[in-house]
Image (spheres, helix red, strand yellow):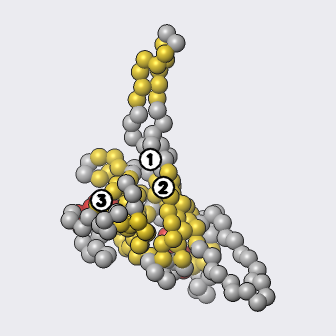
Amino acid sequence: MTTVGFESVEVGVFDASGENITETFDWRDENGGTVNMTITGLEPTISRVSASNKTVWQSKRGTGQVTNTFEAFNPPKDDLDIVLGRDVDLNNSAWVGEDTQAPFVAMIAKSSDVDGNPVYFALTKGLMGYNEIALTTKMQGEEQTPSNTALTGSWQDATIDGKSRVFGVHKGTEGYDAFRQLVFPGLPTEPVA
C-alpha cells in the first residue's frame, strides 16, 4: 500500500500484567512529531522440505521477528521516561540500569493513502528502546539543527479476538474506533483525531 506522509503515532502503555492499556501518548507536531518509521519482519521465514533434488513441500505462515525503527522530533521527556521504563528520582533525573524494566506498549501510526484517506498501522505488543544518543558540536556561525529521537521496538503477538496478532492495518475512518479498541484493550473509547 502506498502511503503519503506520517502524521502521528499514539503509544499505549500496558499495565504490569500486560493485559490492559492504562494510558496513551499522542506524538505529533512539536511534541514528538513523527519523522519516519520502518516496520520489518512482517514476512515469515519460509519452511521447505526437499526430496529427490527438488522442493516437495513448503510453508509460509505467520510473521518473522517483527521490529521497528522510529524517529520522532522532541517527544516529551515524561512520555519517554514511562515508555522506556526509566526510573525518575525526586530531582526529575531519569535513570536506566540493571533494575529498570520497560513496560509493554502498543502503537498506532497514522499516515494517508494517495487519495488522502487515513491509514493506521498497529503494532500490538512490544518493548521500545532508545539505543543510541548522538551529541554533536555546534559550529560557530552555523545554525544548529536539532536531531531527532530514534527509537526501536521489538514486537510480539497479542491475543486479539481470540487470535494471535502482531501487526494490523486499517484504512479509513469507518471502523477505526473498534480497531483502536482492539489495539489498546481496556482503554476507554476516546480516539485521537
At 51% from the left and 80% from the top, the residue drawn is 76
Q: Is residue 86 left or right of residue 7?
A: right
- Asked if labels 2 and 1 touch by Cβ distance under 8 angstroms, the answer is yes
The three-letter amino acid code for the residue at tag 2 is: Ile
The extreme front residue here reads 115
Amino acid type, callout 3 = His
Query: Count of labels shown?
Result: 3
From the image, which quarter does the C terminus lie in? Answer: bottom left
Q: Residue at x 20, y 65 (%)?
A: 174
Contact (CB < 8 A) between labels 1 and 3? no
Residue sitting at x 58%, y 85%: 92
**Residue 15 appears anywhere in the view:** no
Question: Where's residue 16, x and y in %?
Answer: 42, 64
Residue 62 placement: quadrant: top left
Q: Which mark is residue 138?
A: none
* Residue 39, label in figure: 2
Classify mark 3: residues with Cα within 10 Å, few (<14), some (14-19) or many (20+): some
- CA distance for labels 1 and 3: 16 Å
Question: Which residue has dot 1 on it?
Answer: 42
Residue 135 in picture, x, y percent from top left: 71, 75
Looking at the rendered structure, the secondary structure element under dot 3 is strand
In the picture of the structure, the residue carrying the numbered disc 3 is 170
Q: Residue reaching furthest left?
A: 174
Seen from the viewer's position, the closer of residues 99 and 78 is 78
Residue 141: horizontal and vertical position, in percent?
76, 90
